Amino acid sequence: MEKKIIETKELNFINEKLIDELLNQGKNISDSQVEEVLKKARLRKTLDVKDVVTLLNSNTDKQLKEIYKIAGEMKKEIYGDRIVVFAPLYISNYCVNNCVYCGYKRDNKFDRRKLNRVEIQEEVKLLEKMGHKRLALEVGEDPNNCDIDYIIDSIDAIYSTKSDNGAIRRVNINIAATTVENYKKLKDANIGTYILFQETYHKPTYELMHPNSIKSNYEYHLNSFTRAMEAGIDDVGAGVLFGLADWKFEVIALMQHNEYLEKTKGVGFHTISVPRLKKADGMDLNEFPNMIDDETFKKLVAILRIAVPFTGIILSTRESSELRKEVVKYGVSQVSAGSCTGVGGYKEGETKEKAESQQFSVADERTPLEVLKELIDEGYLPSYCTACYRSGRTGDRFMQLAKSGDIQNVCQPNALMTLMEYAMDYGDDELQKKVFGILERELEKIKNIKMKEITRKNLELIKLGQRDFFV
Ligand code: SAM
């Protein structure tokens, strides 16, 4: 087994004692204190950790309604109607870890599998046929069966697979915590965002959930983004597996982690994922007392939106279509669609009901076409844009663009042009009609006149068969 080299000082910058104190004080919060924070949020002032604790402890319907309203408005101001769409690609379920909650844990006995280059290309072609342009690459942790060279070769296999007009233009990577040296290899392989979920920031829970394995080292996992950034990766995506520990603790800890990165590296999270624990083989959901219900989940997404306005929020198909429809209003900016969480699952899905061994069960099994239709019906603009990353607008360059508001003149055209590509290549008559129906409305939202005209012209060229315009 590869020996982990600890290259950075393994700091624990999550101040558990302080979070506990803040959460305790927060229990006695008054209505007027909540109102003060809401006022600050209405004025778009940055909230500090104490303010967020206050929102977490708000408990009247009126306060909750106001939180949803502000979160919805903030989302609209920054992200417009755009919702980015992507899919996960699982290529190996070998895993040396024994995470209590995970279907891929080493104690689960099933035929482990990893895809070879040709099999990866087959999966990619199927994903391209669904219209996907952005993937999240997922593997279990196994330094022997799934080493960094295999990952690098897989990324190359993905980027180089093209079918008809299909192409994967951005591959985000969700692989286990690793060394600076390996992060450098990922950087050189042209990855999009490096995604790693802390699972839980609560150290005692973390240790309980990750027994006797490489993943057991809380601090090593916690400092992954610091190492990734030392290797030159500036887009990192955080996440918590909600259901393991107290959700309020996790939200404050996420903020502490984000602030730590901003302070030490000049840029915080590009995205935050909000997976909730789901049923998987070898685990019983009843054994997790910190599971959160739908109402709490909605509140947490809205509070995150207000707390870190410029950080994208990612929602997966772990959640039902009904709930997805709701939380997209309050803050989610990226959704997966048509997902399979089993290795080789897209090919298997062609012939069987489900892939053999899934990491966890999914609740939204709709095709991307169905997801896109609903998004458009709900007033959104689905986007397959990958332009920022391809134009080098990552890390703090992306944040500056987002904070300046100029993002609307860049993201809106790119969203429209990629949606038009989708409509022409993968849409049925119904979808095309819906897309043509929103073009003028969405073009009007591009404030820069020159950019609006360029976009209009490019949309016509896409209809005539040209592809891959971006600004
Ligand atoms: N092996 C990598 C690691 O150690 O970080 C990649 C993680 S895995 C492919 C993606 C994520 O799925 C995990 O980080 C975890 O949060 C989530 N996951 C695992 N079991 C789950 C379950 N039962 N329900 C929901 N999400 C789960």
Image (tube, grey):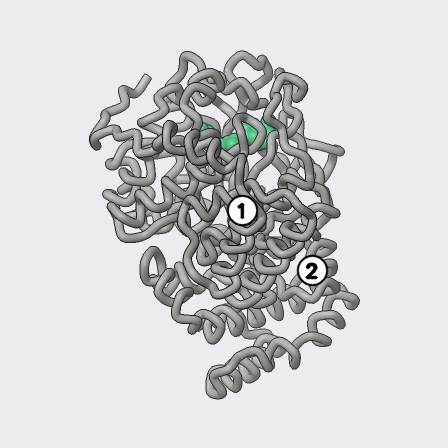
CA separation, marks 2 and 1? 29 Å
Residue under numbered circle 2: 375
Residue 383 lies left or right of residue 325; in this view the side is left
Specify few, some or many for label 2: CA neighbours under 10 Å numbering under 14, 14-19, or 20 or more.
Answer: some
- Residue ID at (58%, 71%): 416
Query: Which amino acid lies under the numbered mark 1 shown in the image of this protein?
Result: Leu
Say the numbered circle drawn on residue 131. Answer: none
Which secondary structure, mark 2?
helix
Residue 327 lies left or right of residue 20; in this view the side is right
Q: Is residue 32 above or below residue 179?
A: below
Residue 301 location, x and y as percent? 57, 47
- Going from N to C along the chain, the mark reached first, 2 or 1, is 1
Residue 107 location, x and y as percent? 54, 12
Residue under numbered circle 1: 55
Q: Is residue 41 above or below residue 144?
A: below
Residue 140 visible? The answer is yes
Q: Quadrant of residue 417?
A: bottom right
- Residue ID at (49%, 51%): 161
Residue 202 lies left or right of residue 67; in this view the side is left
The front one of 286 and 464 is 286
Which secondary structure, mark 1?
helix
Query: Which amino acid lies under the numbered mark 2 shown in the image of this protein?
Result: Leu
Specify few, some or many for label 1: CA neighbours under 10 Å numbering under 14, 14-19, or 20 or more.
Answer: many
